[in-house]
Image (cartoon, helix red, strand yellow):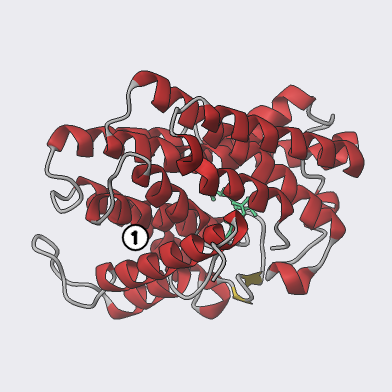
Amino acid sequence: MNAPTIAEDFRRRLNAAAQATEAALDALLATAPLPGEIARPARLLEAMRYASLGGGKRLRPFLVVESARLFGVSGASPLRTACALEMIHCYSLVHDDLPAMDDDDLRRGRPTAHKAFDEATAILAGDGLLTFAFDVVADPATHKDAGVRAALVLALARAAGLGGMVGGQALDLAAESAGAPLSQDAILTLQAMKTGALLRFAVDAGAIIGGADAVQADALSRYGAALGAAFQIADDILDAEGDTAALGKRAGKDAERGKATLVGLLGLDAARTRRDALVEEAVAALRETGFGAATDVLAEAARFVAARRN
Ligand code: GRG
């Protein structure tokens, strides 16, 4: 049998990370309370499970697992960190879909959480996922070294919060009602925060867990930032091209809502050119890690992000 191509290897590893994440999330979101918890209310737990199980590409978990693998680390540390990151991603999707934000009915090809449950339950499910993510990372089961756990908690908080994803979402909402279009620099900052910060955390986490040196950590971080920027431009292009069925969420929203995107500012062709340059930038950063062909699967992930259809 021929050796698998890099694209096949990527697909196989993305599937493996997705399956491992699904199983680990399923176990973490079990009915039995953990020590220190009093009870797990059934409807809230059901909504948290609905929002986090059975869907999604699991790209962020894949990036945590594969970046840790560069350092020869696998098992509970990357997988639990991957689950925590995915919980934060899922919470952001639940809250983003709420009537007060993007007001969407469809996510991952299913009714959004506030449609499947109710608004209050969806807000609480998001809150529950966000909080539980930090519980999972801080738990000694994630890493025996408390310093590593603290570094992960800090990096995750910085990526997810005020100066990261939540801040980016605030800028995004503000741009919708701003009188004038945002500059290119302002759009890049907004996108680096809203979408890029969590994707970059994924590879930063691999570096933290793997005990990367400063050069490796910096190169991986630049890879993550470029991949994140390419991801967001690809997302904007998909929205503009508008295939709701393939996307599993409503397309064509950005223009309708006056969202600040590079597609809106520069047009589709220039956005595609920039997306492709970012993929090259991501691949070039990987070369600087010194891991050689071991980074091929991460390079393929950057290409996948740009070429994806959902
Ligand atoms: C509400 C605090 C708060 C933040 C929301 C991430 C975000 C900020 C909103 C999501 C809205 C959105 C469509 C952003 C564009 C990029 C993005 C995160 C797309 C969805 O990520 P995928 O494609 O989704 O990785 P799956 O379903 O595959 O996990």
Tell whether 140 sits left or right of 156: left
Q: Label 1 crowding class (10 Å Cα cut-off): few <14, some 14-19, many 20+?
A: some
Quick check: can you spot residue 163? no
Q: Position of residue 274 (x, y in %)?
A: 79, 34
Tell whether 286 sits left or right of 310: left
Return the residue found at the far front: 1
User: Residue 71 or 103: which is nearer the viewer?
Assistant: 71
Q: Position of residue 225 (x, y in %)?
A: 56, 33
Does residue 87 sit above or below 111 in this rendering?
A: above
User: Residue 169 or 240: which is nearer the viewer?
Assistant: 240
Residue corresponding to mark 1: 128
Tell me the quarter of the image containing the C terminus: bottom right
Q: Element under label 1?
A: helix
Query: In percent of the image, x 33 and y 67: which residue is there?
Result: 25
- The count of marks equals 1
Q: Position of residue 49 (x, y in %)?
A: 39, 73
- Residue type at tag 1: Gly
Tell me the quarter of the image containing the N terminus: bottom right
Does residue 162 sit above or below 65 in this rendering?
A: above
Query: In percent of the image, x 30 and y 67: which residue is there?
Result: 24
Query: In percent of the image, x 27 and y 46: which residue is there?
Result: 73
Quick check: can you spot residue 9? yes
Q: Position of residue 216 (x, y in %)?
A: 41, 26
Does residue 154 sit above or below 243 in this rendering?
A: above
Q: Can you tell me whether the CB of the residue at mark 1 lies under 8 Å from the nearest atom of ligand 1?
A: no
